Structure formats: structure tokens, C-alpha cells
Image (spheres, helix red, strand yellow):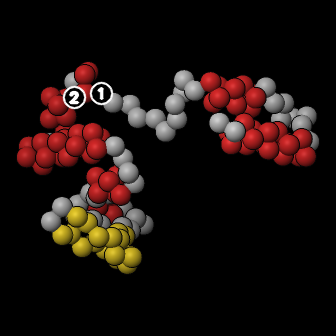
Amino acid sequence: LNEMSESLPRIQNYNVSVKELKDTVLFIRKLVKGGSAHSFGIHVAKMAGMPQIVILKAQKLLKKLEKDHSSEVLSGIKSTKDKIQMSFFNLDDPLLEEIKEEILNLDINTITPVEALMKLNEIKRMLTKK
């Protein structure tokens, strides 16, 4: 992104000021012109509550990339046993399957706004009684 702003005149980079303290990053609520020299994705992931295993894996990849200055090293790190696919939802949950079926069976071309609100309320009740 930083390089794009140099070659394309209509692109401008801005970033949020940060203060780095050892292993902690404080995001100062100030927007400044220019690109960022670092990626703070791992710090944001920590703040968002991502699982520790994901954070550690990302830190491992970042250290390896910084050491070798190459994205080619990713192929050496990636192994089938280390692959993790995170999901915000448990797709095996029968309640979610039931809600999915309710939504898929709706005919949005014939339902009235009041019926849609009633259906939404019914789905909400299904979730709250869980």
C-alpha cells in the first residue's frame, strides 16, 4: 500500500499513531498522513481476543518472514497438521441449522414486512431460549 501511493497520484495513505512499548502497542487516536512502517495485525488480534494459538502461530510466521525478508518461506512453514480454520460459529449446532432452514424456506417475494418482523422475532426467541 505504501508503494502504491508513490506510483498512483490519487492514492494517499493515512495511519493511526501508535506508541510502542516493549511487546505492547498503544493506539493513539490520531490520524496522520503517510503509510505505516509496521503491521499491527497481531496486536489488534490480541486486543480482539483471538485464541492464543493463533497469536503464537502468527508471531512465529512474522519472525520467520522478518528474518528471511521473503514471502517464499511461508511454503516451508505451512504444514497440514498446523492448519487451523477458525469459525465464529459452530456449524454443527442444530439450532443454527434450524435457523438456516427457516431463512432458506422464506419466500422474500411474497412475505409482508410485518410477517418478516414476526419471523425475525421468532428466530430471536429461538436464540434466546438456547
Q: Residue at x 18, y 61 (%)?
A: 23
Q: CA distance from mark 1 to mark 2?
A: 7 Å
Say whether marks 1 and 2 touch (CB < 8 Å): yes
Q: Residue at x 27, y 39 (%)?
A: 53
Q: Position of residue 13 (x, y in %)?
A: 36, 67
Q: Quadrant of residue 41?
A: bottom left
User: Callout 2: 10 Å neighbours few (<14), some, many (20+)?
Assistant: few
Task: Answer yes or no: is residue 9 visible.
Answer: no
Apparent side of residue 11 relative to residue 81 in the rendered image (left or right): right
Q: Amino acid at mark 2?
A: Lys
Q: Residue at x 8, y 43 (%)?
A: 68
User: Callout 1: 10 Å neighbours few (<14), some, many (20+)?
Assistant: few
- The answer to whether residue 5 is above or below residue 71 is below
In terms of secondary structure, where does tag 2 sit? loop
Q: Foreground residue, 87 or 128?
A: 128
Q: Amino acid at mark 1?
A: Lys
Mark 2 highlights which residue?
A: 78
Dot 1 or dot 2: first in sequence order is 2
Q: Position of residue 122 (x, y in %)?
A: 79, 39
Q: Foreground residue, 11 or 84?
A: 84
For the C terminus, give its image quadrant: top right
Q: Position of residue 9 (x, y in %)?
A: 38, 67
In terms of secondary structure, where does tag 1 sit? loop
Q: Which residue is most to the top?
A: 80
Q: Position of residue 90 (x, y in %)?
A: 52, 31
Mark 1 highlights which residue?
A: 83
